[in-house]
Amino acid sequence: MNLSRRQALAFGGAVVTVSLIPIDFAKAASDATMADIKSFTGGASVAEGGIELTTPEIAENGNTVPISVSAPGAVSIMILADGNPNPGVATFHFSDMAEPSAATRIRLAGTQNVIAVAKMADGSFTQTSRSVKVTIGGCGG
Amino acid sequence: MAKIKPRVKVPKSVAAGEYFTVKTLINHKMESGQRKDKKTGKKIPRKIINYFEATFNGKPVFSVDIQPAVSSNPFFQFSMKIEEAGKLAFKWVDDDGSVYETAKSIKIG
Amino acid sequence: MKRIMTSAMIGGLFAASLGFAAQAGETKDSLVINSEDGPIKIITHVKNPPAGSPLPELFSGWVFRSKETRALETDDFDNPGMIFVEQAWEAWNTPDGKAGKSCADCHGEPSSMKGLRAVLPRWDDKQAKLMTIEDYINWSRVEHMGAKPWKYGGGQLTSMVALISLQSRGMPVNVKTDGPAKKMWELGKKLYYTRVGQLDMSCSNCHEDNYGKYIRADHLSQGQINGFPAYRLKNAKLNSVHGRFKGCMKNIRAKPYKVGSDEFRALELYVASRGNGLSVEAPSVRN
């Protein structure tokens, strides 16, 4: 019984299903994350959709997790790691010469939600999030 | 610590008005300020690249406010377009005030 | 009693993998690296290993890594290990030691080292010793440059090993195991199959008996060293072969041999020979 639970947890398919469940931000995000979002938006309401965040479903090592983000019409995009000691990761700023998309590599202290909030040219905001499972305790190879 | 040296990948020539990809990498430990020295038990002070910017002929293209959660040897990739030839300049700012710079010329054609 | 406990423990370590190893298996993707000199095809899978191989097929560690980790190795700009290769290139051109000479003064471009990584370690009659790339670099530093040897496993030496290895990238590993090297190869083989440490495990318990399965959250490789020095996401630097051996021994709670010891030289030759036919892949990217 215990073995089959382990199998279910370790098997990638199960993780994908979990990560596709939408996250209720008001409940899921930490106070620090909410504070960071508020300082970015100035308290304006934040919509969902129109922003795409790409992360691994399972990161082999939390030290270097490749992510990319894209939000047509955005002037800035803030990336937050909700489960890190400090949620702030990076904020990208785009001029009209740049496409509103970027990629980087980030540190995740453990399995958690990565959140992206975009500021649009008209001053509105939108956000999305992805759950990243960070594996620990292996030997590496 | 080895000399800090930025690396950038930029096409030598591009078509006017069409997006192209720019990749940047700089060797830097990105000491987060969260780690402890194993011998003394004291926290190792934070020392990171806290800002990156790319400008084309002096005009802003792309910039990043960076926190300690960006990985060692920070990598940034972005996409941009230009209408005329010129110089794409890159700048990284260290917590200790050091500034690391490089630049590439891009032609239209 | 001790033996029974140990077997149960090892069983427990691999339990999570039972029944779904097939689903979790190795990627079928092939590795082509986008380099400044054009695409380089890497042999990551040998279907028919040389006669006498203990493995039915050979796999580079690359095929066991996640999609994202694999992608980091497909373009030299994306590969953070290349930072250290560039540093070594500067060192290659920089005079050091009493003779006031650089590597370049005698050897020209690093490309003059092409082919070397594929056949090392090898027995050297003049030195009367099994020589690794590290040994040759340090020998030349002392003998020709009048410089101090670099620390075995240290950053400077490992970066230089990566620069020299890079010149052979794509070539199949082909170390000699017979002749005067045989004695060291046999010592390496003995070490490979000897159980050590508090977990009482040998290299083969993981990398021969259980590769492709998960040990806790980690996808076990065949322990091939064709990709070394390897940039590890874990410590964000290049890792030497001996450094990896040391890490493995610590993982099984054994007292590691010294980096640069004859034991690790012998083990390096033996493990390299298990990968004869895979491409030199350094600097690889691993987790």
Image: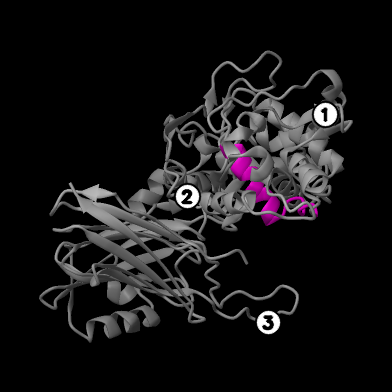
Q: Which residue is drawn at 48% across and 64% down?
A: B71
Residue type highlighted by circle 2: Leu
Residue position for label 2: A9
Check residue C236 for magenta coloring.
no
Instruction: State the mark number for residue C124.
Output: 1
Q: Chain for mark 2?
A: A
Question: Which quadrant of the figure has residue C237?
Answer: bottom right
Residue type highlighted by circle 1: Asp
Residue type highlighted by circle 3: Lys
Q: Are marks 2 and 1 in contact (CB under 8 Å)?
A: no
- The answer for how far apart the CA atoms under marks 3 and 2 are is 37 Å
Which range is magenta?
A: C148-166
The reply, left or right, for residue A99 in relation to residue C26 is left
Q: Considering only vertical position in the picture, is B73 above or below C63?
A: below
The x and y percentages for residue A4 are: 51, 44
Q: Which residue is drawn at 67% across and 55% down?
A: C155
**Residue lying furthest top in this view?**
C51
Which residue is at the front of the view, C208 or C256?
C256
Q: How crowded is mark 2: few (under 14 residues within 10 Å), some or many (20 or more)?
A: few
Instruction: State the mark number for residue B42.
Output: 3
